[in-house]
Image (spheres, rainbow, N blue to C red):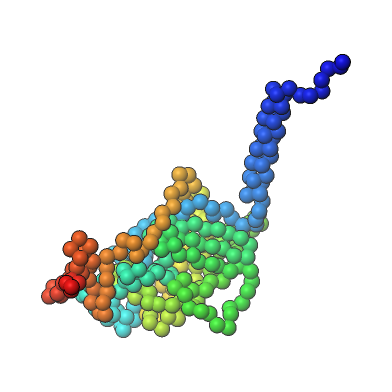
Amino acid sequence: MGPSCKPSSLSLVIVVSILAALTTACTSNLAALANANSYPHYPDWSGQWERIGSLNWPPEGYQVAGPAPLTPEYQAIYENNLALRKSGVLAGDPPATCLPPGMPRVMKMSFPMEIIITPKLTYIYADWESQVRRVYTDGRSWPEYILPEFNGYSLGTWHDENNDGINDMLAIETRGIKGPRSIDSSGVVLHENNETVVFEEIRQLDTKTLEDKITTIDAAFTHPWTIKQHYNHVTENIIWVEYVCAEGNRHIKLGDEWYFLNDEKGILEPTREGQPALAPQQQ
């Protein structure tokens, strides 16, 4: 009787191991190739981008950049907000009640952001209140009606500034932004007509730095206000944080009055002199 053609258990193990190794190598190579060539004419802005500079609208701060270019009417509103804030009222800061920051303030990025690029649509995802911006780059025109949203409606156009065949600057125009909104937490509010228009130019300056040149046109300002917000690139040990404003917010607004929630005592504590504390009525 001739030798058996049935492979031994050891042979099967060796063959299976070789096939598994080849499959893993091929899969890894294909994944890398797909990531590199999915959209070869667009930049790779993957990873995490964290804000550089202060939370004031001008990243260098108002002491360096100077005051906001407010009209007399909105300068008076700002000064009144400052007076209220000194008395404990969080005036001129809608996110204090957990409203979204809206455009353009969302681009301050209290928490980091992620940018996901496809040829027809770019997503800007902010950990701050889990806000998502959708920038349409498919060549569409403005719709006849824009449903107002805090982040507005954004149309974008890619530009190849280096003439190297790769789009490296995303120009964005945003309209249809609803309020109330402030430019930051300092008491500078945007006009109540909610006709703000925001222009942006987003480009990568180097391997570690992204720049967003933001121009805000608003009736509260005497002229278009342009700043340059920079972000630092994080590519390793990335941590994303779920931020739910209502979970830890203790600021309560009742009519025109602001209170601070004291869970331990079960009362709304006053935030200004002469304001009575509020406690639940005993049954």
Whether residue 50 is visible to the viewer of this picture, yes or no, is no
Can you give x and y, in whole percent of width and height, for residue 39 in the image? Answer: 65, 56
Task: State the residue lying farthest toward the top.
Answer: 1
Can you give x and y, in whole percent of width and height, for residue 170 in the image? Answer: 56, 64
Lateral position of residue 261 relative to residue 208, left or right: left
Residue at image x 32%, y 80%?
74
Lateral position of residue 112 relative to residue 75, left or right: right
Task: State the residue lying farthest toward the right.
Answer: 1
Residue at image x 44%, y 62%?
130
Residue at image x 54%, y 62%?
123
Q: Nearer the viewer, residue 219 or 164?
A: 219
Q: Which of 20 and 68 is in front in this view?
A: 20
Lateral position of residue 166 relative to residue 60, left or right: right
Can you give x and y, in whole percent of width and height, for residue 164 in the image? Answer: 64, 55
Task: State the residue lying farthest toward the left.
Answer: 274
Residue at image x 46%, y 58%?
113
Is the residue 165 above or below the residue 274 in the image? above
Q: Quadrant of residue 252?
A: bottom left
Quadrant that contains the N terminus: top right
Lateral position of residue 202 relative to residue 108, left or right: right
Q: Nearer the viewer, residue 13 or 55?
A: 13
Quadrant that contains the C terminus: bottom left
Whether residue 207 is visible to the viewer of this picture, yes or no, is yes
